[in-house]
């Protein structure tokens, strides 16, 4: 549904996006992560024809961004960082105008549906300029959705929303996936990305890492195992470090934390060795790394580079 090849974009002598390629099939959510100024918003603007690339190509919903920008714009819903609403018009009019612009068959029906979905039906007569930050964000989301586009680009959709609204938006993103839409989600909220995204692309002007959250965790964090012991046996950590498949071992208050190359393959051997060494094992369990750990590790590498 969304495909980009080697997109490049500079502003003056600053490179904003370099050699960005991505592929987002329908029914999937792709997360764009990266520090401030990494090029996430620029990527969204390139793929939605709000900005032209210096080089590279992309197709969205079968339309080429260079050859048919009009068709691309019709096929995408965009939530930008700043909502860009008509501040003097009512909530209802804001959405209705947009629905008309897209030539929706029954705009009233769609406007009612999406205002209700976003919890804005009661506020429909209010002037958009008087909405709070989060309410304006909800209206901007309704606008991104009202023409039911196959591809959605959501730039920090939950930023500024209260916890309840943020949860509703996350649910909405899952519904979009079930509905076979393709979603590109820019976010700094890593637990949110981990929960929602099928694939993650970490950007720092150029792509730094890409994969499913599980793949990235496996690749960057190795396989961690926690061994709970009946009593503290810190000397075991030292002994484990001598084993060829153990990358790291540390004593914890309640046992050991062991990093091996592949947990599933090495755990039987690990347990056997521990028993030989006199360990009094209560239980062993996998150590869950998070996408946040992955991200911080990647950024450490970027700072060092
Ligand atoms: N219109 C513009 N003119 C000049 N420089 C720009 C313009 N738009 C973006 N940039 C620069 O391009 C780089 C990438 O910006 P971008 O907004 O894409 O980052 P981002 O990843 O969305 O960051 P954030 O997390 O802060 O939203 C930044 O250095 C930014 O200052
Ligand atoms: Mg941004």
Image (cartoon, rainbow, N blue to C red):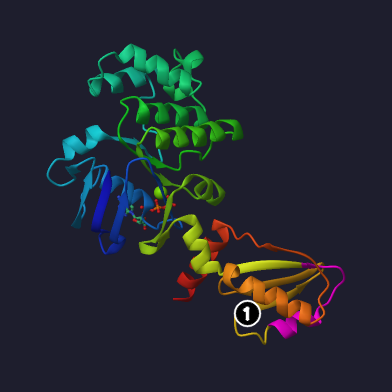
In this rendering, would 295 be left or right of 113? right
Tell me the quarter of the picture where residue 81 sits: top left
Is residue 120 among what the camera can see? yes
Q: Which residues fall within the magenta stretch? A: 228-240
Question: Could you tell me residue 207's position as x and y percent?
Answer: 36, 62
In the image, residue 302 sits, relative to residue 45, either above or below, namely: below
Residue 234 in the magenta stretch? The answer is yes
Residue at the spot of label 1: 246
- Estimate how packed mark 1 is, as few (under 14), some (14 to 19) or many (20 or more) residues with alpha carbons within 10 Å: some
> Does the magenta-highlighted stretch encompass residue 231?
yes
Vertical position of residue 239 compared to residue 48: above or below: below
Q: Residue at x 52, y 50 (%)?
A: 194
The front one of 253 and 160 is 253
Quarter holding the N terminus is: top left
- In the image, 220 versus 157, the foreground residue is 220
Task: Answer left or right for 159 relative to 211.
Answer: right
Residue found 51% across the figure and 33% down from its top: 171
Residue 192, how many percent across, how many down?
53, 46
Q: Quadrant of the C terminus?
A: bottom left
**Element marked by disc 1:** strand
């Amino acid at each position: 549904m969304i495909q980009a090849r080697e997109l490049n974009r500079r502003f003056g002598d600053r490179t904003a996006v370099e050699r960005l390629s991505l592929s987002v099939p329908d029914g999937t959510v792709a997360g764009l992560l990266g520090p401030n100024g990494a090029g996430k918003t620029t990527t969204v603007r390139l793929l939605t024809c709000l900005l032209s690339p210096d080089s590279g190509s992309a197709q969205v919903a079968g339309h080429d961004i260079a050859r048919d920008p009009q068709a691309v714009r019709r096929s995408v819903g965009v939530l930008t960082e700043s909502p860009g609403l008509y501040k003097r018009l009512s909530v209802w009019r804001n959405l209705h105008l947009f629905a008309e612009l897209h030539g929706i068959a029954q705009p009233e029906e769609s406007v009612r549906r999406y205002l209700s979905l976003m919890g804005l039906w009661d506020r429909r007569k209010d002037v958009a300029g008087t909405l709070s930050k989060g309410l304006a964000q909800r209206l901007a989301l309704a606008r991104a959705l009202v023409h039911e586009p196959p591809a959605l680009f959501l730039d920090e959709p939950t930023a500024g929303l209260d916890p309840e609204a943020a949860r509703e938006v996350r649910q909405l993103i899952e519904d979009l996936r079930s509905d076979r839409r393709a979603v590109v989600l820019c976010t700094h909220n890593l637990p949110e990305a981990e929960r929602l995204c099928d694939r993650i692309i970490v950007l720092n002007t150029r792509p730094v890492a890409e994969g499913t959250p599980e793949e990235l965790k496996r690749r960057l964090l190795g396989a961690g195992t926690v061994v709970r012991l009946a009593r503290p046996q810190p000397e075991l950590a030292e002994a484990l470090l001598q084993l060829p498949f153990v990358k790291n071992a540390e004593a914890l208050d309640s046992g050991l934390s062991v990093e091996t190359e592949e947990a599933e393959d090495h755990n039987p051997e690990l347990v056997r060795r521990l028993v030989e060494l006199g360990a009094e094992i209560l239980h062993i369990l996998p150590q869950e790394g998070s996408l946040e750990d992955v991200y911080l590790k990647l950024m450490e590498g970027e700072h060092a580079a």
